[in-house]
Image: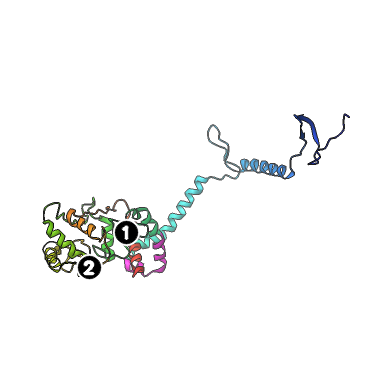
Amino acid sequence: MAGLIERDKVSGQTTTGHEWNGIKELNTPVPRLLWAFLITATIFSVTWTVLMPSWPGINGYFRGLLGVDQRVAVTQSVEEAAVERESWTSRIDSEDFAAIQADDALMAIVRETGAALFGDNCAACHGTNARGTPGFPNLVAAPTMWGDDPETVAETIRVGINGTSPETRYAQMLAFGRDHMLERADIDAVVSYVETLSRPELAAGMDADTLAYGAEVFAANCAGCHGEDARGMTDTGAPNLTDQYWTYGGDRASIRQSVYHGRAGTMPSWEGRLSPTHIKLLTLYVLDLRAHEQ
């Protein structure tokens, strides 16, 4: 009968009267919550478009009734940050290392800023924790090869090692085997001797005559750089061979590789890449890491 309202028995909704292959279309109304969301979103969009920068034009863009300009806001933030940094960078530049290290507030800034500088410039070689990677020394615990006073550390960062600066520090271990400076037997003997310097317990399993001869080879060829006691020399940048810290590895194969082929590690000359302030911050940061390790 025309005009009768039909309801779906399952949902209770009325039908539209349309039917496809036995499937009837329900006349389901749009949920009120959805209508509320759409209306709110529309009002917000129109309001935002009017108040804030939005539509592009021929000679620019609509700047909005509030006149908000993100470029101006960012520029202002950068200027404010520069003023804030100036308040402590001027002290970093003017005060000596000892005075800065004695100032807890300044050292808190050094630790925060220095960590970022180290991560951006040094961590790729020395590791994020500054404990070294194969071929690059441990800066936290190992003895420094050129000296650990602040001025020396800062100078090493500034000029680098085997770097491009005219004032760079030079450090190179000769290739005693490759360049035929020592015979194979001499190399084997001195390698055995060097092994026992950091691990004396190994001497019990080695031939005493070989170790004695290795000591003679060391005295004649290595002591000039590493020192007669093999504890390294800051004048030559030669490492201590008696401790547990090895840049290229302390196992027999690595030691033999060093003796046979030599070593010539490189550290960039950071002058020109980093400002004097940044170099000083890095120096203080590394020394602080070392101080907390002890």
Residue in the foreground of this view, choosing between 277 and 253: 253
Residue 132's disc is 1
Dot 2, how many residues are within 10 Å of its Cα: few (below 14), some (14-19), or many (20+)?
few
Mark found first going from the N terminus, 2 or 1:
1
Q: Give the overall secondary structure of the magenta segment.
A: helix
**Residue 231 visible to an observer of this rendering:** no
C-alpha distance separating marks 2 and 1 = 26 Å
**Which residue is at 82% across, 37% downward?**
7
Give how far across and how far down residue 132 sits, in percent.
32, 59
Give how far across and how far down residue 228 sits, in percent.
15, 68
Colouring chosen for the image of the structure:
rainbow
Q: Nearer the viewer, mark 2 or mark 1?
A: 2
Q: Quadrant of the C terminus?
A: bottom left
Give how far across and how far down residue 123 sits, in percent.
35, 55
Give the total of numbered labels.
2
Q: Amino acid at mark 1?
A: Gly
Q: Amino acid at mark 2?
A: Leu
**Residue 37 visible to an observer of this rendering:** yes
Q: Secondary structure under badge 2?
A: helix
Q: Quadrant of residue 144?
A: bottom left
Magenta range: 97-112
Give how far across and how far down residue 179 sits, in percent.
13, 52
Residue 69 included in the magenta stretch of the image: no
Residue in the foreground of this view, choosing between 6 and 51: 6
Residue 98 included in the magenta stretch of the image: yes
Residue under label 2: 202
**Which residue is at 42% across, 67% downward?**
105
Q: Quadrant of residue 189?
A: bottom left
Residue in the foreground of this view, choosing between 263 and 278: 263
Q: Quadrant of the N terminus?
A: top right
Q: Secondary structure under badge 1?
A: loop
